[in-house]
């Protein structure tokens, strides 16, 4: 993509290119916006209907993804994940395909069916090996890692570390 700065224009271009390349079979029955959200340790992205305009879906991407050390493939895989939710009728006007958005390894299967299994695996590997260090560096303190008595507690594993 021509724009190398990770801003709203860059995000919109990534959304358009990803939709055109991998989701051309999915009708866009409403407006779909994409924005950077807050920096988060565990949430990579989300999709929701705009509470002020229920005819618009908003994809929110982790604010840490603005950092140049986060590879573009991690951001694109997150976007594919959210577009899969859209395609399956979660926070979109399309018919909902199943009761639960991650039921039965649906994400891995959808990536594979769209020729993106390598992207899925590459993102998983990067998140496993690099994400913890990035989080430690960018968000060094946080209530999720210590109790008031300063005893260390076990932090639940993010969903991408769990089996499919």
Image (tube, rainbow, N blue to C red):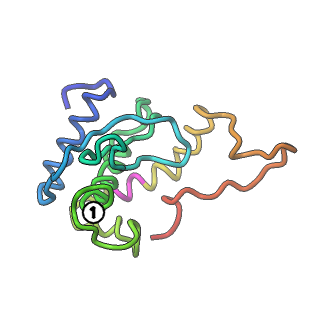
- Residue ID at (38%, 66%): 101
Q: Nearer the viewer, residue 143 or 99?
A: 99
Q: Secondary structure at mark 1?
A: loop
Residue 98, given in percent of the width and then of the height, sits at: 33, 73
Main secondary structure found in the magenta portion: helix
Q: Is residue 69 above or below residue 74?
A: above
Q: Is residue 9 above or below residue 71?
A: above
**Quadrant housing the C terminus:** bottom left
Left or right of 15 in this view: 134:
right
State which region is magenta.
Answer: 119-123
- Residue ID at (36%, 50%): 47
Examine the structure image and report whether residue 155 is included in the region drawn in magenta: no
Left or right of 107 in this view: 151:
right
Residue 126, given in percent of the width and then of the height, sits at: 46, 49
Left or right of 118 in this view: 149:
right
Residue 100, given in percent of the width and then of the height, sits at: 40, 70
Q: Nearer the viewer, residue 120 or 148?
A: 148
Examine the structure image and report whether residue 120 is included in the region drawn in magenta: yes
Residue 21, given in percent of the width and then of the height, sits at: 15, 50
**Quadrant housing the N terminus:** top left
In the displayed orientation, state which residue is furthest to the bottom. 104
Q: Nearer the viewer, residue 56 or 162?
A: 56
């Amino acid at each position: 993509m021509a724009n190398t700065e990770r801003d709203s224009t860059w995000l919109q271009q990534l959304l358009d290119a990803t939709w055109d390349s991998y989701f051309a079979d999915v009708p866009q029955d409403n407006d779909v916006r994409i924005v950077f959200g807050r920096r988060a340790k565990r949430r990579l992205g989300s999709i929701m209907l705009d509470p002020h305009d229920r005819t618009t879906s908003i994809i929110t991407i982790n604010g840490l993804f603005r950092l140049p050390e986060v590879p573009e493939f991690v951001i694109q895989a997150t976007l594919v994940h959210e577009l899969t939710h859209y395609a399956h009728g979660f926070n979109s006007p399309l018919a909902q395909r199943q009761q639960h958005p991650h039921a039965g390894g649906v994400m891995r299967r959808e990536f594979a069916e769209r020729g993106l299994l390598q992207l899925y695996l590459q993102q998983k590997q990067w998140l496993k090996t690099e994400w913890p260090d990035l989080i430690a560096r960018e968000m060094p303190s946080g209530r999720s890692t210590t109790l008031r008595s300063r005893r260390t507690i076990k932090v639940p594993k993010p969903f991408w570390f769990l089996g499919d």
